[in-house]
Image: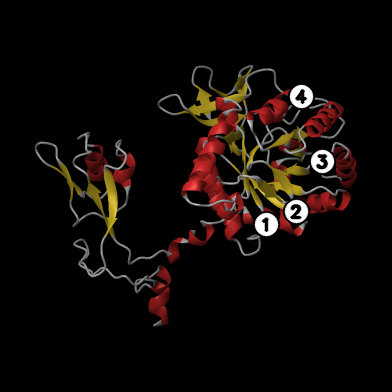
Amino acid sequence: MADLTSNFIGIKSPNPFWLASAPPTDKEYNVRRAYEAGWGGVVWKTLGEAGPPVVNVNGPRYGAVWGADRRLLGLNNIELITDRPLEVNLREIKSVKRDYPDRALIVSLMVPCEEQAWKNILAEIEDTGADGIELNFGCPHGMAERGMGSAVGQVPEYIEMVTRWCKQYSRMPCIVKLTPNITDVRMPAQAALAGGADAVSLINTINSITSVNLDIFAPEPTIDGKGAHGGYCGPAVKPIALNMVAEIARDPITANLPISGIGGITTWRDAAEFMVMGAGNVQVCTAAMTYGFKVVEEMISGLSQWMDEKQISDVADIVGRAVPNTSDWQHLNLNYIAKAKIDEDLCIKCGRCYAVCEDTSHQAILMSDDRVFSVNDDECVACNLCVNVCPVEGCISLEQMAAGTTDPRTGTVVSDVKADWTTHPNNPSVTAAE
């Protein structure tokens, strides 16, 4: 059996599945239920300093984007950090950690960029016995207007400064949570590393408005006739999150910086994709808010079964396995040629492949009078659009052409020699050099 035991920056947990800092981790009751359901760790919902109270809206806090089957694809929230008193949260954190010593318990923090404010709250967190802290530099709404959240995460100098304070005044491992609301996520990651961060976590939510009410002409969720931008999460953000994780894992400066992956993780497969792309563990929120805490059972059993099938015994051995195969476009093999193939036995004759190829692609799919579909290799560029729109899995596939055969579209002989754009004769820089 695969061993899912996780050791992330020295923080041990029975599996790599943590609940992210969010409404599901706002109080002792929820966190105890999460641990009993099987979650390996929890990042307690973001705490602020003991001072002016945090006031959340008493109306709808979430907006949504659904698929055609009403499946939740994305969730937008306008909720702030915890509005519960700091002393109550600290007491509950201490109680939970005492009763679940084998589970990871991280405390998310957000206070103003003032050294004394950080020094004060760090001492209070240490007294709880928590395993570590996560610096919330990502929230795009509510607190950013107060000089916190993404307002810090978008300024590398602030990230480095606050991280240094946390390492100076605390013994606890420090995770820096990064905002995706930035042009190049490598810059804040490098700043976190320069400040002494033990790890980064990403992505936090994406600045968004998910919908507009066309009856009252206001963004949703709507509070007394008005709406505001919020933070977007859920399955729809997974591609963005995966790319940002890969960017940090591939950057020579941050290549060895541990990453906690966040963003649309719903199944064990999602988690495995984040981990092979460089994440040492994963954090989940929207899936738990959609299906409940027991969704972790599928994640645990699925990851374990997949690792058994791959004959991988230790979860640490999958981390970063896909990073060497993640490249930039100019280094892809331009001598690789494939063609689409249609399995007539699986085809249900819906015609979607024909319609999209004829109207929007390369006119490479032919339709006979009796609706039998075939591929015209003379026009096919293997763009994969037909595969993606076909409702029958496996009906259409791309097959690589063997070396030595002639591509009927271009008339060139397929080569088994790899060639990328940097050496391609059509590259202007190559021509200029010659």
Residue 55, numbered circle: 4
Image position of 12 with respect to 301: above or below:
below
Q: Crowding near pointer 4: few (<14 within 10 Å), some, many (20+)?
A: few
Judged by depth in the image, the label closer to the viewer, 4 or 2, is: 2
Image position of 205 with respect to 318: above or below:
above
Secondary structure category for the residue under label 2? loop
Image position of 350 with respect to 163: above or below:
above
**Residue 377 at x, y = what percent?**
19, 55
Question: Please, what is the three-letter code of the amino acid marked with disc 2?
Answer: Ala
Residue occupying the far left of the picture: 369
Q: Earlier in the sequence, mark 4 or mark 1?
A: 4
Residue 67, numbered circle: none
Q: Earlier in the sequence, mark 3 or mark 2?
A: 3
Task: Report the quarter where the C terminus lies.
Answer: bottom left
- For the point 60% across and 21% down, the residue is 222
Q: Quadrant of residue 133?
A: top right
Q: Earlier in the sequence, mark 4 or mark 2?
A: 4
Residue receiving disc 3: 112
Q: Earlier in the sequence, mark 1 or mark 3?
A: 3
Residue occupying the far bottom of the picture: 434
Q: Earlier in the sequence, mark 1 or mark 2?
A: 2
Judged by depth in the image, the label closer to the viewer, 4 or 1, is: 1
- For the point 24% across and 54% down, the residue is 380
Residue receiving disc 1: 257
Residue 197, numbered circle: 2
**Residue 392 at x, y = what percent?**
29, 37
The answer to whether mark 3 and mark 2 are in CB contact below 8 A is no
The answer to whether mark 1 and mark 2 are in CB contact below 8 A is yes
- Tell me how far mark 3 sits from mark 2, CA to CA: 18 Å
Secondary structure category for the residue under label 1? loop
